[in-house]
Amino acid sequence: MSIGHCNNSTKWFITINQKQHYLKKSEIGLAKKLALKKYVKLKIKALEASLAEIKLHETKTTKAQVALNNLLNDNAYIELLSDYLGKLKSEATVWANADYPKNTKHPESLVHPTVGGLMVRSKSESMIAIALSEQQIPFRYENLITNQIYLGENLIATFETSDCPLDYQSINNKINQFLK
């Protein structure tokens, strides 16, 4: 499966016998399945590579992780995978989906889709939402800070610069650090 981007539209393609075929918008079910298949294959490769790195005590990002990062940076794939990535269960889901005080300033800036139809302001925020959902960690986007939220206890903060952009591996490392 591959996705072509042209201006504000995307097209889905499947390769059969080394020839690309266009998938119609009516074939979204097949497109979702193919996107999920590609995601699962890349996730397996990334996990296998991570396991090999752990065994070798290495911490560098692998080609498989880079490929997974690239897939998860593509909004068209995120849209196709949102049903799968957005499935959270348990009481935590009720908490995450309950009404809460949100930042209502500049709703026009919410342009990046992520899991479960959530729209966020940046690709980094989209990657964070996906990583949290993958690990089945409930979250609230732009919840107003109250006295019950404390950095390092129930609030994870990330930072990035143009010289040091946030990537999917860094996000997972931060989450895993918090879970320990």
Image (tube, rainbow, N blue to C red):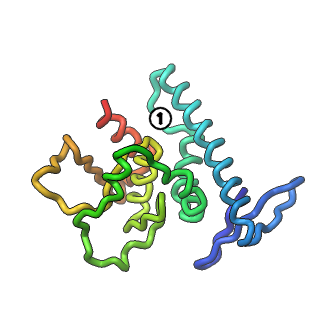
Residue visible at 36% across and 55% down in the picture: 163
**Horizontal placement of 175 versus 149: left or right?**
right
Q: Position of residue 36 (x, y in %)?
A: 64, 50
Seen at 62% across and 43% down, the residue is: 40
Q: How many discs appear?
A: 1
Residue 36, relative to residue 78: is it above or below? above
State the residue position of label 1: 60
Residue 34, percent across and down? 70, 54
Q: Secondary structure at mark 1?
A: loop
- In front here: 60 or 126? 126
Quadrant assignment, res 29: bottom right
Where's the C terminus, which quadrant?
top left
Residue type at the position of mark 1: Lys
Extreme right residue here? Answer: 17
Is residue 63 something that shows in the picture?
no
Q: Is residue 151 left or right of residue 158?
A: left
Look at the picture and state if 68 lies above or below 99: above
Residue plotted at (34% across, 77% down): 107
Q: Is residue 46 above or below residue 147?
A: above
How far from the left and from the top, in percent, is residue 47?
A: 55, 34
Q: Residue furthest left?
A: 147
| Residue 64, position as x, y percentages in the image | 59, 41
Does residue 42 appear in this view?
A: yes
Depth check, front residue: 113 or 42: 113
Dot 1: within a 10 Å radius of its alpha carbon, few (fewer than 14), some, or many (20 or more) residues? few
Q: Is residue 60 left or right of residue 32?
A: left
